[in-house]
Amino acid sequence: MENISEPKVFANTVILQSEGLLKYILETGVYPREAETLKELRNATAKHPMGFMGAAPDAGQLMAMLLKVSNAKRTIEVGVFTGYSLLLTALTIPDDGKIIAMDPDRKAYEIGLPFIKRAGVEHKIDFIESPALPVLDKLIEDAGNEGSFDFAFIDADKKNYWNYHERVMRLVKIGGIVAYDNALWGGTVALPEKAVSKDKREWRLLSLAFNEAISKDCRVEIAFVSIGDGVIICRRIA
């Protein structure tokens, strides 16, 4: 998986194909509970040319619940973009919690930074402008970091998902949660290749390979959730 070239990124359709039903879910159960700063950041992200890369608010709602039920305090975020999921995490974890967040695109992160500051949670965030693998490797070098994180959220380049998985398995504690976004790639994982547009085929293959690998990983319990663009939730058990 490490040697696969980086395919271009295009917007996916959401897994829930009924636009009316999705609109009902968002307007009834998601938007009314969304923090004002999150709503403002979501609207700001929508103006970005790649705004579709932002975390889906319904997936964010699920993520917040996972953070709460797991009593997460120390978390990792691989892939930040404008910071919707990062802000959501910072709003959810305790005041003395900490998020190690990594992304090579600081310019996109700075779109969300004013909202993070306004929410009063910047002190919880350690943003590192870098590709994720070197940062994760450096964390692993410190033996004190192994098994010390409660939660990780991965929403980055799909060709490295398994590489990220191997590293966060060392960093997240037994009983900790790891969530992988975009796992179903717009539903294309269930389609024959010829039925998938050429611009999505490479990403589909990457998703299929990762999904098959993680399904066989006895170190985790998993759940595929058809929300947003598909999320795999893992609980480390070994």
Image: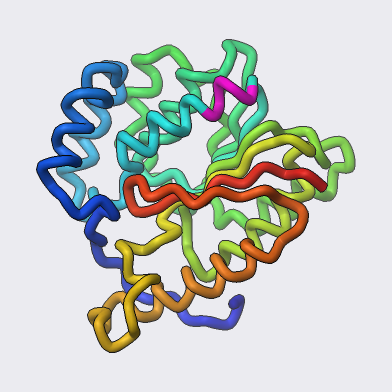
- Residue pictured at 40% horizontal, 61% vertical: 184
Q: Main secondary structure of the magenta part?
A: helix
Residue 215 position by quadrant: bottom right
Looking at this view, is 18 or 80 the one in front? 18
* Vertical comparison of 161 with 178: above or below: below
Q: Name the outermost residue toward the right.
A: 143
**Percent x, y for residue 176?**
70, 36
In what quadrant of the picture does the N terminus appear?
bottom right
Q: What percent of the width, then of the height, locates residue 232?
A: 51, 51
Q: Which sits in the foreground, 191 or 208?
A: 191
Which residue ends up furthest to the left in the rendered image? 20
* Region rendered in magenta: 66-70
Name the side, left or right, on which 148 lies relative to 100: right
Visible in this render: residue 128? no
Q: Nearer the viewer, residue 210 or 16?
A: 16
Give above or below for 195 relative to 122.
Answer: below
* 69 inside magenta stretch: yes
Q: Quadrant of residue 190?
A: bottom left
The residue lying at 56 percent from left, 57 percent from top is: 131
Would residue 87 be seen by someone viewing this image from the given angle? yes
Residue 173 on the magenta segment: no
- The coloring applied to the image is rainbow
Residue 213: x %, y % from top left: 63, 69
Q: Note whether 109 is above or below 188 in the view shown.
A: above
